[in-house]
Image (cartoon, grey):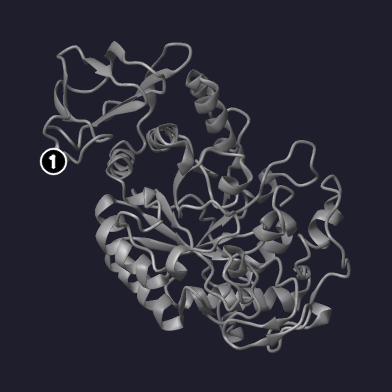
Amino acid sequence: MRHRSRLLGGALAGLLTAAAVATVVPWPSQATPPGDKTVTATLFEWKYDAVAQACKDSLGPAGYGYVEVSPASEHIQGGQWWTSYQPVSYRIAGRLGDRDAFRNMVDACHQSGVKVIADAVINHMSSGSGTGTGGTSYAKYTYPGTYQDRDFHGCRKDITDYGNRGDVQNCELVGLADLDTGSDDVRGAIAGYLSDLRSLGVDGFRIDAAKHMAADDLAAIKGKMSDPGMWVSEVIHGAGEAVSPEEYTGIGDVDEFRYGGHLKSAFQGGNIAQLKSVADGKLSGDKARTFVDNWDTERNGSTLTYKDGASYTLANVFMLASPYGSPNVYSGYEWTDKEAGPPSGGAASCGNGSGWTCTHARADITGMVGFHNQVAGAELKDWWDNGGSALAFSRGDKGFVALNNGDGELSEAFRTSLPAGTYCNVAKAAPDHCDGHTVTVADDGTVRTTLPAKSALALHTGAKG
């Protein structure tokens, strides 16, 4: 993308199995995650055995529907995080685990009720030459057993003009060898790779750098698969650019980058009241995957990050409480060097001092995942705001949330549509350990409470005290 540095290209790769490619067949449109658990957790640069454990320990019990995992392909060597994003073959032979580890992870997550989204690089290969993490010797435009020179676009220069569609989709993203996705051979190879991951149980894909491939090319690749699963395309919006996110909604969901930018503006600008119109000017909610941040945006400064502390938490609470889009909770690791690879090579853990943010497993976030599941399909109503740092709203008669992003306490009598009773504040405590965090809803639906600075209240009918 235009906003990326050379470090920010890439995504997953796997083992190419040409036999897995079907002829072009009709496939149902499957974008927004099906079922009643639509929240995704992205465990960035987690080893696959660590993801398997997280599915058992936290993701499954919390009610996450999906986990998105980082690149599984053989890739260029190096300790930086972005080396995972320059594939050199479609073998699962990277630093995060081998084919067996990947398969075992998928099985473990499924047993915990969590589906798996694989981040897939299909726009490009590497930017140089060498020996990959699995021992494959490669050169730019020459990847033995996978691609050769004729499989790449003839524009062998970096993208310079984002107002020119041909430049964006045929030239090279920060020097990465750009695959000719208009070629039927290339389409077949990519479809074979994705079908192989499906054979290992993967439920869907995040299509990296989708903006740099024509939507028709992606549709043709998907059409070569007999059962393509769910797709989410990464398409960064840019005002006045030739390629827009709306072009890709016929293929599946699209990552809505404007959403994260809107949250940053609201929470850092002191006016979260503006979030009443958070859906305006963005993709339709049934096609948008929302997020507070991801690994690119936390490094380029376009969104909030874990370094923003309480405001970052409140932004995640809002995302999980709002009816707009399908939420994706990002969970990465602490960093000062933007290039730094994952702690312990990706052997992630959530203990103190581990270096991993573990946002997905925090009680205030898992409580909101439960909230999101409980209020699914309920309308937003009872909106209240103070014109600046605080807001509140109900989700039908199933849930209520209030946020105070201000620097002082907020005392208010909120109107809700909840039935009378005692509720657990799931933004502070788990329903089965809620002592000291209960709130009473009066017979008229009113909640009288005082919210400390930078805090939230979240109540739902599945967590009554």
**Vertical order, 173 against 236 (above or below):** below
User: Residue at image x 63%, y 45%?
Assistant: 300
User: Residue at image x 34%, y 60%?
Assistant: 114
Q: Is residue 291 left or right of residue 456?
A: right
Query: What's the residue type where badge 1 is placed?
Result: His
Q: Quadrant of residue 79?
A: bottom right
Rendered location of residue 441, percent (x, y): 18, 19
Rendered location of residue 283, percent (x, y): 60, 38
- Which quarter shows the C terminus? top left
* Closer to us: 58 or 304: 304
* Closer to us: 460 or 2: 2
Rendered location of residue 367, percent (x, y): 27, 41
**Vertical order, 286 against 155 (above or below):** above
Question: In the rendered image, which residue does mark 1 sit on?
Answer: 433
User: Residue at image x 13%, y 29%?
Assistant: 436
Q: Is residue 353 visible?
A: yes
Q: Is residue 22 visible?
A: no
